[in-house]
Image (cartoon, rainbow, N blue to C red):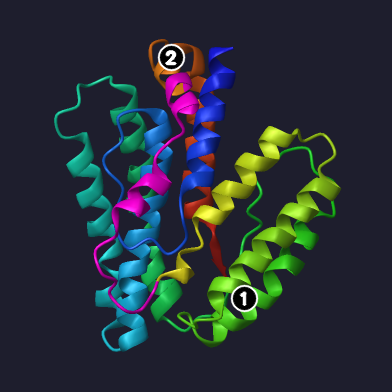
Amino acid sequence: MQSLLLVAAVLTALIGFSHGQTEVASCPTSMMDFMTWMGSVIQYCNGEYLIALRESKENCEEKVGTLGPCLMTEKDKCIAGLDDGDMVKTTIEASLGALIIAAPGYQQVFCSGVTVDLNPTTSVGGCEDGMTAASQACHAPFMEIFNEDRVDLRLCEAYKTMAACETDKVKELCPNADSMEITIDEQTRAMYNFYCVETATPAPPAPATTKQMSKPATTAAAADNVDDDVDSGKSVVVSIVTIVSTTYLSIFTAL
């Protein structure tokens, strides 16, 4: 039961983040907070170099090179003061550590001009043989734009269309997947749509923005209850974090 409550809390957090975030959420104090924070870090750190590249593609590697240090800064800031063995600290180190390792590859993706494709990104198992081909067909319109211009403003909506297409194919071609598995897969994929970041630097967010990101009281209570017995849900959290990290590590492949 505790594991199910933990998954419910994490799902709520995944659904709660918004595309194109221009600031990072507060450091997490629970696993629900972690997923909200994780989404905001991915959006913010990738958004920084996208904004810079939209202004000018000169010094591309230097601009994209800010990704790793940005992720490192957010990681170090949020693990400071947490005890060794703390579940949130362990999860931050494992998940952002994987993203930091992958970050240098984004300089090649965004700066080399090499034609790339998206690897199939579904984390759902037991799919039919046609899933890989169906996934690649979903990617094709997005990748056509991406390979023309890595920072094209059309990529925001194209990514949303691609993600929706892939979710439909998962529902069609992965008959053994349950609704929770599909939702985690769908929301994790959506987390990587950092192409919706606004080019102009926005004004400081109004208080309402913070409220929109706040967790519902009932879900917060569930998350607090889960945190009292973290071992029961540890494997669930690790599997979700593995999905997030693996998606980031393998999202692009050179053709």
Image-based side of 113 in relation to 4, left or right: left
In the picture shown, does residue 220 fall above or below 248? Answer: above
Secondary structure of the residue carrying tag 2 is: helix
Q: Amino acid at mark 2?
A: Asn
Evaluate whether residue 135 shows in this view: yes
Q: Quadrant of residue 36?
A: top left
Residue located at (41% from left, 70% from top): 197
In the picture shown, does residue 73 fall above or below 225? Answer: below
Q: Contact, CB < 8 Å: mark 1 with mark 2?
A: no
Task: State the quadrant of the C terminus.
Answer: bottom right
Q: How many marks?
A: 2
Q: Amino acid at mark 1?
A: Met
Q: Is residue 207 magenta?
A: yes
The circle on residue 143 is 1
Residue located at (62% from left, 76% from top): 143
Residue 84 x %, y %: 22, 21
| Magenta residues (range) | 198-222
Residue located at (54% from left, 59% from top): 251
**Residue labelled with disc 2:** 225
Task: State the quadrant of the N terminus.
Answer: top right
Evaluate whether residue 104 shows in this view: no
Q: Residues within 10 Å of mark 1 (few under 14, many from 20)?
A: many
Residue located at (61% from left, 40% from top): 184
Furthest residue in direction left, as rendered: 81
Residue 83 x %, y %: 19, 21
